[in-house]
Image (cartoon, rainbow, N blue to C red):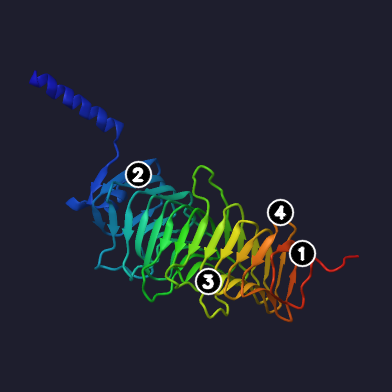
């Protein structure tokens, strides 16, 4: 009888082993995730799971179709000694495609450039249900393509939580980006020569919630209809925010089918702080999905040969300007249903002597205006 039970157990064990041949790395027992990866086949579908806390640098280079899954509580922590030459990442994905990282936390120290870096043209890289804590957060560089789903970034040093550089492309679905109550200056999303598409993300208490620079672009689009998270929320409960969105140096913010909700943005002194600051030859294109409420600074400010196009947007309850256009810039509202609402601000419409606002007849509830070049329609009289 015991022999029969033993044979049955052995048979079931063999079946289970063949059903799930995925190796499990136990870092709490001294095993190394990085060493395991160096021994795996890089050119076929591969999967590894790990548990515990791995205090090591992890390099994923040259893989095609790799999955790294953390079991509950799994963490990769930057070692406090043997720091490599800067810049470096705690987890680095380079020259790879079809890589999925799932279900674990990455902790970085101030010496790291970022917790996770995806570079050297890596494509089809998915980070899902991940958390990063520490310096920067997640960086996509060198024309890489990354998808983030349900990612939580708590940035405690460095500059930006999620960054796209050098023609990289990042898609974000859901998640939270936040920072500690310290004196640092942080950005939530940073698109510098890169592109970010986002829906369903909350960005909280960043000095600049979305920073778009050097020809970068950010699109707010409901591109993944399989998830319920759509709205991008920028809030400022700690009062530390300077700009909800900063768009500069030939960059673009496009608010499409995902709503952008910005509340309590900017600082009480006004100037160029506020919900959205578009400057230095940049553009804002926004429809009814842009909703700005209760700005402590300006609502939407457009400066230095920039342009903003509003079509059904709402800018209300700001302490200073609602729509502010200066330094040879332009802004306008298009004929839409609903109309563009700009009301209840310190000054609803403001333009200086070298700038113009068009489409005032397509705006609703405007009461205070300081703008000598204000056109009711889209253009002056055409031939």
**For the residue carrying disc 1, how many other residues have a C-alpha within 10 Å: few (<14), some (14-19), or many (20+)?**
some
Residue 339 sits in quarter: bottom right
Badge 1 or badge 2: first in the primary sequence: 2
Badge 2 or badge 3: first in the primary sequence: 2
The residue at 77%/76% (across/down) is 373
Badge 1 or badge 4: first in the primary sequence: 4
Q: CA distance from mark 4 to mark 3?
A: 28 Å
Nearer to us: label 2 or label 3 = 3
Q: Quadrant of the N terminus?
A: top left
Element marked by disc 1: helix
The residue at 69%/71% (across/down) is 367
Badge 3 or badge 1: first in the primary sequence: 3
Asked if the residue at tag 3 contacts the one at tag 2, i.e. Cβ–Cβ closer than 8 Å, the answer is no
Q: Quadrant of the C terminus?
A: bottom right
Badge 2 or badge 4: first in the primary sequence: 2
**Percent of width and height locating residue 335:** 75, 58
* Residue designated by label 1: 361
**For the residue carrying disc 4, how many other residues have a C-alpha within 10 Å: few (<14), some (14-19), or many (20+)?**
few
Residue 344 sits in quarter: bottom right
Nearer to us: label 1 or label 2 = 1
Asked if the residue at tag 3 contacts the one at tag 4, i.e. Cβ–Cβ closer than 8 Å, the answer is no
**Percent of width and height locating residue 226:** 51, 42
From this view, report whether residue 182 is shown above or below residue 77: below
Residue 76 sits in quarter: bottom left
The reply, left or right, for residue 26 in relation to residue 207 is left
* Residue designated by label 3: 243
Q: Which mark is residue 41?
A: 2
From this view, report whether residue 172 is shown above or below residue 216: above
Q: CA distance from mark 3 to mark 1?
A: 29 Å
Residue placed farthest to the right in the image?
383
Nearer to us: label 4 or label 3 = 4
Q: Which mark is residue 337?
A: 4
């Amino acid at each position: 009888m015991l022999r029969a039970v033993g044979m049955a157990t052995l048979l079931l064990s063999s079946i289970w082993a063949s059903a799930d041949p995925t190796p499990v790395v136990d870092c709490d027992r001294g095993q190394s995730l990085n060493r395991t990866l160096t021994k795996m086949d890089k050119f076929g579908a591969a999967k590894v799971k790990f548990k515990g806390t791995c205090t090591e640098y992890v390099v994923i280079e040259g893989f095609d179709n790799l999955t790294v899954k953390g079991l509950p509580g799994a963490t990769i922590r930057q070692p406090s000694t043997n720091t490599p030459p800067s810049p470096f990442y705690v987890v680095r994905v380079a020259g790879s495609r079809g890589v999925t990282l799932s279900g674990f936390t990455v902790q970085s120290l101030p010496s790291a450039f970022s917790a996770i870096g995806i570079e050297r043209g890596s494509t089809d890289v998915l980070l899902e249900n991940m958390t990063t804590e520490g310096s920067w957060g997640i960086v996509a560089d060198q024309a890489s393509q990354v998808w983030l789903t349900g990612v939580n970034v708590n940035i405690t040093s460095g500059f930006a939580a999620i960054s796209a550089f050098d023609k990289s492309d990042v898609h974000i679905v859901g998640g939270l980006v936040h920072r500690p109550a310290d004196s640092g200056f942080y950005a939530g999303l940073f698109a510098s020569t890169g592109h970010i598409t986002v829906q369903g993300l909350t960005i909280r208490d960043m000095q600049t919630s979305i920073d778009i620079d050097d020809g970068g672009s950010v699109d707010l689009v409901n591109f993944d209809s399989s998830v319920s998270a759509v709205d991008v929320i920028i809030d400022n409960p700690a009062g530390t925010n300077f700009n909800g969105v900063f768009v500069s140096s030939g960059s673009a913010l496009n608010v499409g089918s995902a709503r952008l909700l910005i509340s309590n943005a900017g600082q009480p002194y006004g100037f160029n702080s506020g919900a959205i600051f578009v400057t230095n030859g940049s553009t804002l294109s926004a429809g009814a999905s842009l909703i700005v409420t209760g700005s402590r600074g300006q609502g939407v400010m457009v400066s230095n040969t920039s342009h903003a196009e509003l079509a059904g947007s709402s800018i209300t309850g700001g302490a200073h300007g609602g729509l502010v256009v200066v330094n040879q810039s332009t802004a306008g509202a298009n004929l839409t249903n609903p109309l563009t609402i700009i009301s209840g601000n310190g000054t609803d419409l403001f333009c200086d002597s070298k700038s113009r606002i068009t489409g005032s007849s397509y705006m609703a509830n405007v009461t205070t205006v300081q703008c000598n070049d204000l056109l009711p329609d889209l253009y002056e009289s055409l031939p």
